[in-house]
Image: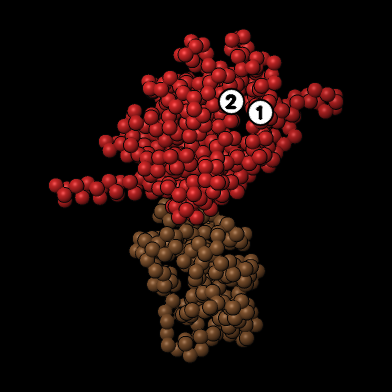
Amino acid sequence: MSSIQANSLGVIEPQLYRHAEAFLLQNGEQLHGYELVFETYGTLNAEKSNAILICHALSGHHHAAGFHALDDAKPGWWDACIGPGKCIDTDNFFVLSLNNLGGCHGSTGPNSIDPSTGEIFGPNFPNVVVKDWVASQAHLADHLGIQKFAAVIGGSLGGMQAMQWSIDFPERLYSAVLIASAAKLSAQNIAFNEIARQAITTDEDYCAGDYQQFDKNPEKGLMLARMVGHVTYLSEDGMKTKFDRDVKSGDFEQGANVEFQVESYLHYQGRAFTQYFDANTYLLMTRALDYFDPARAFDGNLTRALENTTAKFLVLSFSTDWRFSPERSQEIVDALIQARKNVASAIIESEHGHDSFLLPIERYTKVLSAFLQRSFAELENSAELLATKNEVDS
Amino acid sequence: MRGDLALIATLINPGARVLDLGCGEGELLDHLQRDKRVNGYGLDRDAENIRTCVSKGVNVIEQDLDEGLDNFVDASFDMVVMTDALQAVKEPRELVRDMLRIGEECIVTFPNFAHWRCRAQLALKGVMPVSKQLPHSWFDTPNIHLCTFTDFEQLCAAESINIIQRRVVNANHQEKSFINWAPNFFGTYAFYRLGKSS
């Protein structure tokens, strides 16, 4: 049975962008062209001024909203927020969502064929960083004729891309929404990523990254990596509410074989992840997270890194998020204020930890919606002013 | 615009950098942004206020004044404004110090606890004063540091804060000549424009 509701985008067809020219990466390596799989929702207006770019997080992909087939069990990962009448309102905006370079959902990545060898890239896929993603997204925008985004929006690693956009292409976005993000990862955060990477690379099925050649998949490692990740995306209170010490199976009286609900949940999530996510992509994405630090080129001064930005910023964080805590968002806000940039911020009360950014929490969607509606109205106003001016001039 | 905010707006120069502590629905900053092209930021902690500010395009930052202003660097604003919040913060003295650390000047407004109506309620009825400006009962009031004009001026003297200007108004935010005859008796609200000691 279809679970498609009235305010859903319905069935969405992914599209493919082919970048034929060579693409030089930040680390000096070069890709002989690349492909990006993407989806769009809503209608691009004649001026091409109503586009919003959605940047995905660590395990995200292009399928942010709508369904791929009528009998899909679940819609895209951010369907709660993207659609007609939703906070990222496709009645007003044309929304673009892609799978990043290095991904494993259809864009060029470790699973693609390296044209220089004719073999799968595997572990030899070059290290890409947030700046590379932004550059490749800009090529996609060129392809679609979008000169300037009304907004670039992202949560977590996606927020880092939105920030990089504001730094690298200040003239190409009107506003930037940074949700549960950070200007750089803390040592604790890098540590969790390294545990995840070790889990994968020490799995005997990892085969130094060439697991596909041996028809293997480091499932144990990938599952463990995902389980660790999941724990850090939730809060203690949230886990207590969701699982507490509830028992899934077994009996305390018999003294053994007790499986707690939380164990069952983590096993399920971990196992499911191995079915749709690639280990080499996971390594690549976590490294991109770790390396992101736009202030590094400015002696660690984030204010200077943000000096040339012109976007209006909205910075959102969640009270129980300890992986990307409100303090990390505050650092961004403080730097923006020092750089005299337009910025608004809110700390959303939620018990769902880092995962909150994916959930339709009322206060969160209301403030995001207010910000985007304001941006939309301002853009409409400036378009009208320009039209009037042109009439007067001619 | 609310009378007190209109009065404050006249004290702020075009293009100034303004920080509004407890900015509410962003009325002052919205006006200043449009009329005087100020670079303004407001701090608030109320969800609905923040959403309203965002929908107006006011730069609102979610921040609790009781957590301090350590994240703001010295001398980074021309004017730091705090309307009607002094009496509700945990550490008013530290906050005023911080305001002058961050701003070149600051404006503080608060209700006068020595207004004759307050005095009358306490003296004649023997109850904690309740008024339009201070509508809460003693047991659920957010106003934990009520003071009088005299009290505040004593604090300024002790802290070597320069009172550049004082304007005292009635409940309708109007200046009346009789008020100045005994401001600490007839004045409902006061605006203090403060600067560092010279």
The hue used for chain A is red
Q: Amino acid at mark 1?
A: Ala
Q: Amino acid at mark 2?
A: Tyr
Taking the spot 47% from the left edge, 59% from the top edge, the residue there is B41
Badge 1: residue crowd in 10 Å (few <14, some 14–19, many ≥20)? many
Residue to which mark 1 is pinned: A196
Query: Is A231 placed left or right of A156 in the picture?
Result: right
Is the residue under label 2 in contact with that under label 1 (CB below 8 Å)? Answer: yes
Label 1 – label 2 distance at C-alpha: 9 Å
Q: Secondary structure at mark 2?
A: helix
Q: Secondary structure at mark 1?
A: helix
Q: Position of residue A132 (x, y in %)?
A: 47, 31
**Residue A218: which numbered mark, if any?**
none
Taking the spot 49% from the left edge, 24% from the top edge, the residue there is A29
Q: Position of residue A389 (x, y in %)?
A: 20, 50
Circle 2 chain: A
Q: Position of residue A80 (x, y in %)?
A: 49, 35
Taking the spot 64% from the left edge, 36% from the top edge, the residue there is A190
Q: Nearer the viewer, residue A84 or A94?
A: A94
**Residue A282: which numbered mark, if any?**
2
Pick out the residue farthest to the left: A394
